Image (spheres, helix red, strand yellow):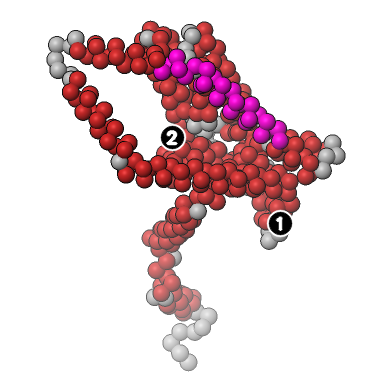
Amino acid sequence: MGLFRRDDPQTVRLESREVELSASRAPWSLWADGFGRLGIRSIQVIVVVAVTAGIVFAMQQVTLVTIPLVLALIFACAFAPAMTWLRRRGVPSVFATLITLLAIAIVLTLLGWLIVWAVRDQWDELYVQAESGFQSLLAWLDTLPFDFLSTDQIDEWVAWLTDFVLSAQFGSGALAGVGAVANFLTGLVLMVTILFFFLKDGPQMWEFLLRPFHGEQYRRARRIGDKTTVVLGSYVRGTATVAFVDAIGILIGLLILQVPLAIPLAVLVFLLAFIPIVGATLAGIVAALVALVANGPINALFVVGVVVLVNQLEGNFLQPVLMGRSMKLHAFVILIALTIGTVLGGIVGAVLAVPIAAAVWGIVQVWDGPDLPARWARPKQRLET
């Protein structure tokens, strides 16, 4: 008979202790404590960051494809209600798509013609006023008690600029500009083609992509697709409406103040309004500079006042109503998104950054249910004392 019996409590404790010691000596036990779990999370984060960086790098190498693709997706979401309305009235998808694209082409053509007409009608007058203002500035600099800018320096700069225009470097830059125009036209044609198929067969394409998913994964993927379509479409339509109202308000102010190129400046306000925060500032600076050159500093101050007033009315009254709280992003998030978008994609990246950020936040809001955000994004319940 042994010293300890198998059913003895002391024997059981010794065997349990031996099992625990054996498990603690196993290699995988190093990942079981708190520090090990932290290491696993760190590795996961590194992998996610590396994959994301690889995807971004790959997209940067084929921007001629990725940018038209993203733009076509956003425009398809914006015009999805029009396509749905036409389909419900029995219009075939092909004809509904052609009608939508034709309406877009007509609006853009009329807008371009209006800009060209306004610039051609007022450019000569603005050029004369700009030259006169520049000569007045030079005369004022000559009256200063210190030698701020001499005539010899101005002549030297003009000679340098002339030499640069006639140099091979400027010619190579012009050739690069021709290449950029060719890339733009190629991207435009590609975007229109992709937009045609997105408008025509978008729902079928999405259902095809959802075939690998089943059960809750399928329902989550459907929620993500529907929410992305709603957010992107609402963002584009709301921003376009806000930009249109801004442009009309500033156009009225510029016409009252008799600022040249009022219509092109209003169009510039409309386009730059798609870049939040920064766009309104740039548009106001350009309008003020034109007023300064054409009509003097007092008129330029009035233009700045008009721009500030219109932007305040838009930001405090119009935008909250049209955009809704579901797509409202904090100003800090908008600035970070604009910075990242500008670094990765330039002006186009700055335009696309905010709607993409809004779509990502919308996906988080429906991750666990139609009105149930992801667990980490839910507000914490305050403990009552």
Q: Residue furthest right?
A: 90
How many numbered marks have been drawn onto this rendered protein structure? 2
Dot 2: element: helix
Location of residue 10 by image quarter: bottom left
Name the amino acid, label 1: Phe
Q: Please say whether residue 258 is visible from this viewpoint.
A: yes
Write the residue at 19% across / 9% down.
Answer: 143
Q: Which residue is mark 2?
A: 335
Residue 308, percent from left and from top: 46, 16
The image shows residue 22 at horizontal and vertical percentages of 42, 77
Does residue 223 show up magenta in the picture?
no
Question: 10 Å neighbourhood of mark 1: few (<14), some, or many (≥20)?
Answer: few
The residue lying at 74 percent from left, 40 percent from top is: 98
Q: Which residues are magenta?
A: 102-127
* Residue 107 included in the magenta stretch of the image: yes
- Which one is nearer the viewer's eye here, 102 or 245? 102
Q: Residue furthest bottom?
A: 1
Q: Is residue 211 above or below residue 279?
A: below
Q: Which residue position is annotated with label 1?
A: 208
